[in-house]
């Protein structure tokens, strides 16, 4: 079996599929602290890409409430219960990935959800971590917590869906690392559905083929962000390209946040696929829960996020979330503004650190009227 270096695990691991890495890798950052679970992203993706027959319960983008929610139901706990708990020595994973367990005959370790697990895409919405006692009232700090986790395909560095397909019907694009299912080649064996630890490949019972998030590649090819990113109401998302691990660029906001500062972390890195959706962990959630989900960098990331006010370079990168339909490939902090440029070198965003406040006079002399604020 081929060996590959997995930078998220700080070690080599086995990977049963040999292909050169892409020229550049598409990546996303989701700031969980800002998501309001409005599901605009879910609807944007659904109406654009999965409104056909057999796609009724298929959500390439979904937003679930943690700790209890999940789509398909139990997608993460079902796998975690059959793997050993993640063990880390500093930033190095010492436990086994889904590619390294003995029981799987060279296939990634996984499980296949039941059809009914897809029938409740938002089960557990807004459920908090613990019971609320009768008569309990707000006392300044909430003892219970929950957060919203938006999820799409991770367009992984080492995709287990690609590794598992007996037909070679899934491939990772050389030009941007987007992972796609060839609908002509797919015969619906569903090995990919079983192998993806994030359950982001879906079987269509009508077409009898599997499909998944296409990374909005027609938009990406034009230098534009994905629909789920552009439509995000909370502006929690940034979409761009990661440079190589060896040469991250300080002026690439994705590189800066993910590779250089490590403010945003991969989801369940212990599985070994090295996903490329990175999450800024929610600061109000206890570290142990977040560490099993995002790995050992949680405490440092939360500390960094709390101190953003003293960190203009990092704050500047975060201010560029959701500000342009163009992919920002370069950015700079100029005085009190964050400025972003697209792949053509056009300035596409200029965001002040402090929003200007305009005070409208109560009395409008021109029209001889008084205006009242109603909100
Ligand atoms: S998230 Fe799943 S479907 Fe997407 S590339 Fe990774 S293994 Fe494949
Ligand atoms: S990147 Fe495009 S296809 Fe993928 S979840 Fe977002 S909107 Fe859907
Ligand atoms: S549109 Fe943005 S804020 Fe709304 S649910 Fe999706 S990720 Fe969260």
Image (cartoon, rainbow, N blue to C red):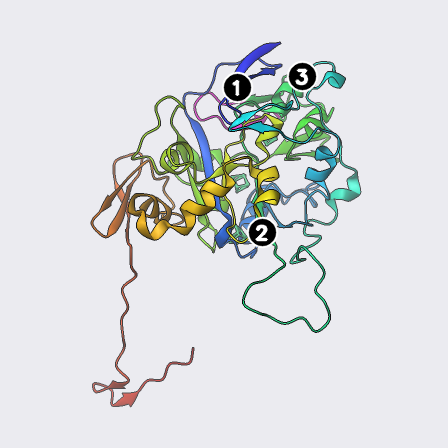
**48 or 81, nearer to the observer:** 81
The residue to which callout 3 is attached is: 167
Q: Secondary structure at mark 2?
A: strand
**Viewer-nearest of discs 1 and 3:** 1
Looking at the picture, tell me which residue is in the foreground, 205 or 164: 164
Question: Are there few (<14), some (14-19), or many (20+) residues within 10 Å of tag 3?
Answer: some
Identify the residue under disc 1: 11
The image shows residue 251, relative to residue 314, as above or below, that is above
Q: Which marked residue is nearer to the observer: mark 3 or mark 2? A: 2
Q: CA distance from mark 3 to mark 2?
A: 36 Å
**Secondary structure at numbered mark 3:** loop
Q: Main secondary structure of the magenta part?
A: loop
Mark 1 neighbour density, 10 Å: few (under 14) some (14–19) many (20 or more):
few
| Mark closer to the chain start, 1 or 3 | 1
Q: Quadrant of the N terminus?
A: top right
| Residue 272 pos. (x, y %) | 59, 25
The magenta span reads 172-182
Give the mark nearer the N terminus: 3 vs 2.
Answer: 2
Reading the image, the residue beneath label 2 is: 148
């Amino acid at each position: 079996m081929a060996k590959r270096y997995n930078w998220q695990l700080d070690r080599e691991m086995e990977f049963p599929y040999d292909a050169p890495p892409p020229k550049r890798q598409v990546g996303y950052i989701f700031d969980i602290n800002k998501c309001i679970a409005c599901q605009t992203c879910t609807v944007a993706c659904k109406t654009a890409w999965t409104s056909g027959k057999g796609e009724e319960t298929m959500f390439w983008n979904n937003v679930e409430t943690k700790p209890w929610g999940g789509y398909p139901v139990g997608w993460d706990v079902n796998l975690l219960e059959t793997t050993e708990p993640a063990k880390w020595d500093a930033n190095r994973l010492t436990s086994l990935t889904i590619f390294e367990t003995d029981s799987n005959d060279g296939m990634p370790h996984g499980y296949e959800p039941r059809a009914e697990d897809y029938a409740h895409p938002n089960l557990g919405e807004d459920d908090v971590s613990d019971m609320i006692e009768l008569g309990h009232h707000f006392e300044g700090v909430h003892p219970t917590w929950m957060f919203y986790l938006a999820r799409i395909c991770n367009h992984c560095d080492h995709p287990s869906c690609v590794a598992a397909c007996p037909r070679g019907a899934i491939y990772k694009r050389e030009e941007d690392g987007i992972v796609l299912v060839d609908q002509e080649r797919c015969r619906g064996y569903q090995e990919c559905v079983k192998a993806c630890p994030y359950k982001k490949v879906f079987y269509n019972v009508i077409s009898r083929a599997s499909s998944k998030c296409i990374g909005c590649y027609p938009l990406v090819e034009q230098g534009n962000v994905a629909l789920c990113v552009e439509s995000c109401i909370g502006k929690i998302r940034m979409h761009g390209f990661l440079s190589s691990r060896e040469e991250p660029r300080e002026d690439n906001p994705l590189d800066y946040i993910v590779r250089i500062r490590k403010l945003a972390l991969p989801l369940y890195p212990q599985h070994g696929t090295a996903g490329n959706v990175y999450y800024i962990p929610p600061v109000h959630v206890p570290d142990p829960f977040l560490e099993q989900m995002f790995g050992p960098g949680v405490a440092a990331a939360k500390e960094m996020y709390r101190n953003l006010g003293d960190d203009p370079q990092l704050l500047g990168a975060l201010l560029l979330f959701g500000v342009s339909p163009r992919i920002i490939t370069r950015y700079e902090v100029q005085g009190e503004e964050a400025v972003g440029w697209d792949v053509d070198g056009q300035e596409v965003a200029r965001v002040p650190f402090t929003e200007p406040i305009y005070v409208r006079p109560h009395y409008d002399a021109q029209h001889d009227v008084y205006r009242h604020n109603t909100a």
